Image: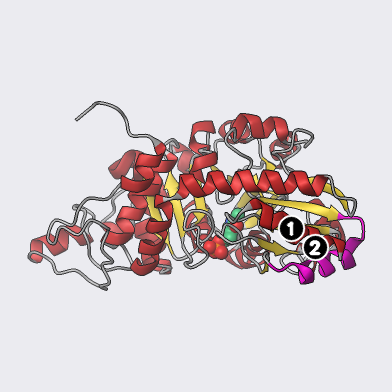
């Protein structure tokens, strides 16, 4: 064996997986079982008391899901990961470990529309208060910090406009405030950006998007960077205080640099219950094997489509960080040198009606509310994903009435451009 550390594409195919020890199966089997037989009564007791690692029940862990967890932890450079049923479930599980009722977290205003809704409404009923900040104004994060702030949440490449967030600058604010930085890396995937290399303490994904990559399976994942000290000042009692559910053990003390991933599993997933189906884990693992190939093609196609749109007379503006003229191009060169992702927006001179019209004329682009599929997708955020926001909030979050969002797929770019040309011209 050579001493070389495996590269990203090798990890995407192999990390976490071995031939099945019983059957020799080379692809990771789908362990479609709810539960696992204990060796004996002592073994059962030690599993329940967290004195030994092993399988108990698929709500808490499953061998297929474990391969997915190890693979994404390796690709992101984290210490451990926990897979759950969806990206939104991952966000709930993360914040449940960090916030008590009455606590606050700061979130970048440019976010996936579903996250804006979840943070504003659902989390309010848990007593978790979101305070918005502007990712283009780092000082707005500093101003938002209070003694009740427990975390900062940003997207690496932000929905819907594909803008690039200055992760290092915001991580400096988080460090000064003594709170973890959570980065939603869904739109970048670890192929384009590895937030832990830039100071993130926790990375979260909707696996539903580029990691799964084929628009067929929901999933979410939480990656623990192992960088945060949870013991400071009793601020994070779920991690630092004795847990009555587990004979009084303290998770940080017992599990060290993967305590956060353990907390998410044994306090979050076990008690809230959003387990990922092993079948979905298998589908997503298969998708991840081709992540580097797909992501590069997504980015190359997106750049070609953005350049075409920028030169079209019906188009008022294009927001794609991969264009040299874009205001985020400098940040894109720093954080995502292989490509600026495949999700971006453009605005039409004809406003709201032109947006609705375009979406109805496109044929190859599917009109639907998803991103990160092999297929090219289109949506008009103002009339769909962001329709709950008032006009000012729509504009602030990058979803004004004239804005159309694309998720560029891996088809031939000439066909995508031809489809846009006929729809814009008609
Ligand atoms: C889709 C998405 C989510 C939510 O993930 P689900 O798997 O749909 O629950 C969160 N963040 C971003 C950036 C997303 O695109």
Above or below: residue 122 compared with residue 145: below
**Residue at coordinates 78% horizontally, 36% vertically from top-left?**
327
Q: Is residue 262 visible?
A: no
Q: Give the prevailing secondary structure in the magenta stretch.
A: helix
**Residue at coordinates 14% horizontally, 56% vertically from top-left?**
21
Q: In the image, ligand 1 is in what quadrant?
A: bottom right
- Front-most of residues 370 and 374: 374
The residue carrying mark 1 is: 418
- Is residue 139 left or right of 54 when viewed as pictured? right
The residue carrying mark 2 is: 422
- Is residue 141 left or right of 246 when viewed as pictured? right
Q: Residue extending furthest right? A: 350
**Residue at coordinates 49% horizontally, 43% vertically from top-left?**
190
- Front-most of residues 403 and 387: 403
- The answer to the question of whether label 2 and label 1 lie on touching residues, with beta carbons closer than 8 A, is yes
- Front-most of residues 125 and 297: 297
Membership of 330 in magenta stretch: no
Quadrant of the image occupied by residue 349? bottom right
How far from the left and from the top, in percent, is residue 57?
26, 68
Tell me the crowding category of disc 2: few under 14, some 14 to 19, or many 20 or more residues within 10 angstroms, Cα based: few
Secondary structure found at label 2? helix
How far from the left and from the top, in percent, is residue 320?
73, 44
* Count of labels in the image: 2
Give the CA distance from mark 2 to mark 1. 6 Å
Q: Is residue 368 visible?
A: yes
**Residue at coordinates 62% horizontally, 29% vertically from top-left?**
334
Q: Which mark is residue 46?
A: none
Which span is picked out in magenta?
A: 348-363
- Is residue 171 left or right of 83 when viewed as pictured? right
Secondary structure found at label 1? helix
């Amino acid at each position: 064996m050579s001493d070389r550390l495996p590269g990203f594409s090798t990890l995407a195919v192999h990390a976490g997986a071995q031939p099945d020890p019983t059957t020799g199966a080379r692809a990771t089997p789908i362990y479609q079982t709810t539960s696992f037989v204990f060796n004996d009564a002592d073994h059962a007791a030690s599993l329940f008391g967290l004195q030994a690692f092993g399988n108990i029940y698929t709500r808490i862990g499953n061998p297929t899901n474990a391969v997915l967890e190890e693979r994404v932890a390796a690709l992101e450079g984290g210490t451990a990961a926990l897979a759950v049923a969806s990206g939104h479930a991952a966000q709930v599980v993360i914040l449940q470990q960090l916030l008590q009722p009455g606590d606050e977290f700061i979130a970048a205003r440019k976010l996936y529309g579903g996250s804006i809704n979840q943070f504003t409404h659902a989390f309010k009923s848990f007593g978790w208060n979101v305070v918005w900040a502007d990712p283009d104004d780092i000082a707005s994060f500093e101003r938002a910090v209070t003694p009740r702030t427990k975390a900062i949440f940003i997207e690496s490449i932000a929905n819907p406009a594909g803008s690039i967030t200055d992760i290092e600058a915001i991580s400096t604010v988080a460090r000064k405030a003594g709170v973890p930085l959570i980065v939603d890396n869904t739109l970048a995937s670890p192929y384009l950006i590895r937030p832990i290399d830039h100071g993130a303490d926790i990375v979260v994904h909707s696996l539903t998007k580029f990691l799964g990559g084929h628009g067929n399976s929901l999933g979410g994942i939480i990656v623990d960077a192992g960088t945060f000290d949870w013991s400071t000042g009793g601020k994070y009692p779920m991690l630092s205080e004795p847990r009555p559910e587990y004979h009084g053990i303290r998770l940080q003390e017992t599990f060290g640099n993967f305590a956060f991933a353990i907390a998410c599993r044994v306090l979050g997933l076990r008690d809230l219950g959003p387990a990922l189906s092993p079948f979905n884990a298998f589908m997503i693992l298969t998708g991840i094997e081709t992540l580097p190939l797909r992501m590069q093609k997504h980015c190359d196609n997106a750049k070609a489509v953005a350049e075409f749109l920028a030169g079209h007379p019906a188009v008022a503006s294009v927001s794609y960080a991969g264009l040299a003229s874009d205001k985020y191009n400098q940040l894109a060169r720093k954080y995502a040198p292989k490509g600026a992702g495949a999700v971006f927006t453009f605005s039409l001179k004809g406003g709201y009606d032109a947006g609705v019209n375009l979406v109805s004329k496109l044929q190859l682009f599917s009109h639907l509310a998803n991103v990160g599929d092999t297929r090219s997708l289109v949506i008009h955020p103002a009339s769909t994903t962001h329709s709950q926001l008032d006009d000012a909030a729509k504009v602030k979050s990058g979803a004004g009435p004239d804005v159309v969002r694309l998720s560029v797929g891996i088809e031939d770019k000439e066909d995508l451009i031809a489809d846009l040309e006929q729809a814009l011209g008609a």
